[in-house]
Image: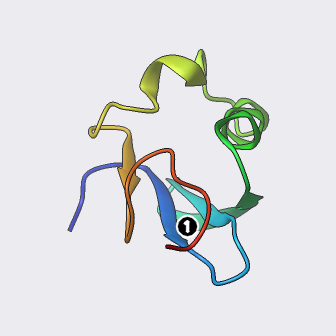
Amino acid sequence: MSSASIVVHPPTSTGGRRVSVHSQGRDEILGTAFSDHDLVVFLEGAGVQDPDSILDDDHWVEWRGGRAHRWSAA
């Protein structure tokens, strides 16, 4: 199991990636991001300070089922 508290799930067939955060013992879906900007906005709304600086930090963010920063299905 990953120690990252933010998960960017695999791209959907129609594009975009679901984003969830693990906080206070539970997972919360923040929404579907279609870009890094969307991801940053979701994380800011969840109270993450300076989210731009953690997108490539695997202690914070786990990119599942696809390369980081790729938003469409292959």
Q: Is residue 54 left or right of residue 28?
A: left
Q: Quadrant of residue 19?
A: bottom right
Secondary structure beneath dot 1 equals strand
In the rendered image, which quarter contains the N terminus? bottom left
Query: Which residue in the protein does label 1 denote?
Result: 27
Residue 12 location (% of width, % of height): 62, 79
Residue 41 location (% of width, % of height): 77, 34
Residue occupying the point 73% across, 80% down: 14
For residue 50, above or below residue 9: above
Q: Is residue 30 left or right of residue 58?
A: right
Q: Quadrant of residue 54?
A: top left
Residue 9 location (% of width, % of height): 50, 68
Residue occupying the point 48% across, 17% down: 53
Residue occupying the point 60% across, 57% down: 71
Q: Quadrant of residue 43?
A: top right
Q: Residue furthest front?
A: 74
**Badge 1: residue crowd in 10 Å (few <14, some 14–19, many ≥20):** few
Q: Is residue 20 left or right of residue 1?
A: right
Say how the picture is coloured.
Answer: rainbow
Q: Could you say which is closer to the camera, residue 37 or residue 70?
A: 70
Residue 6 location (% of width, % of height): 47, 50
